[in-house]
Amino acid sequence: MELFSFLSIGITILFNLHWIFPLPHFWGMILGSSLLCIGCIFLFCSLKTLSIKRAFGREIYKSKSESKLITTGIYKYTRNSLYLRANRSFFGWFFLLLLTFMLILTLFFIVLWFFVGK
């Protein structure tokens, strides 16, 4: 995460971008709050669908016959609901703070999650 943070700040400095993204603060607050709420709902739905043990990796070492693919709840629509939640939360923080490097950081993570999630 630190590497992406340094790269984001470096790109902002290198290309002489504005530190504060030019968006009215009112709209940033509305969008940011909405996206953070959506992220929290995704997190709650993920933890509700999975058992707490499975959500935190305690069932990861079970044999294939004991472990089953979850296809209910939010997992009916997405395989990586926690990546989706983090994505919404990062965009939410960007819109709340309106920092340009936060947008660049979010884009770096989207690319990373795209390749990791496959």
Image (spheres, helix red, strand yellow):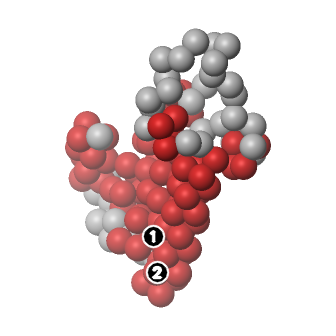
Measured as percent of width and height from the top left, residue 78 is found at 69, 42
Using residue 92 as the reference point, say whether residue 1 is left or right of it. Answer: left
Residue visible at 52% across and 35% down in the picture: 54
Q: Of residues 18 and 47, which is closer to you in this image? A: 47
Residue visible at 72% across and 49% down in the picture: 73
Measured as percent of width and height from the top left, residue 52 is found at 49, 43
Is residue 15 visible to us here? yes
Q: Crowding at label 1, few (<14), some or many (≥20) Cα neighbours within 10 Å?
A: many
Q: Of residues 60 and 103, which is closer to you in this image? A: 60
The reply to whether dot 2 and dot 1 touch (C-beta < 8 Å) is yes
- Residue placed under numbered mark 2 in the picture: 29
Q: Quadrant of residue 16?
A: bottom left
- Please name the amino acid that badge 2 sits on: Met
- Please name the amino acid that badge 1 sits on: Phe
Relative height, residue 70 to residue 24 (above, below): above
Q: Of residues 42 and 25, which is closer to you in this image? A: 42
- Residue placed under numbered mark 1 in the picture: 95
Using residue 103 as the reference point, say whether residue 14 is left or right of it. Answer: left
Measured as percent of width and height from the top left, residue 17 is found at 33, 60
Q: Quadrant of residue 90?
A: bottom left
Q: CA distance from mark 2 to mark 1?
A: 7 Å
Measured as percent of width and height from the top left, residue 61 is found at 48, 17
Relative height, residue 92 to residue 15 (above, below): below
Label 1, secondary structure: give it: helix
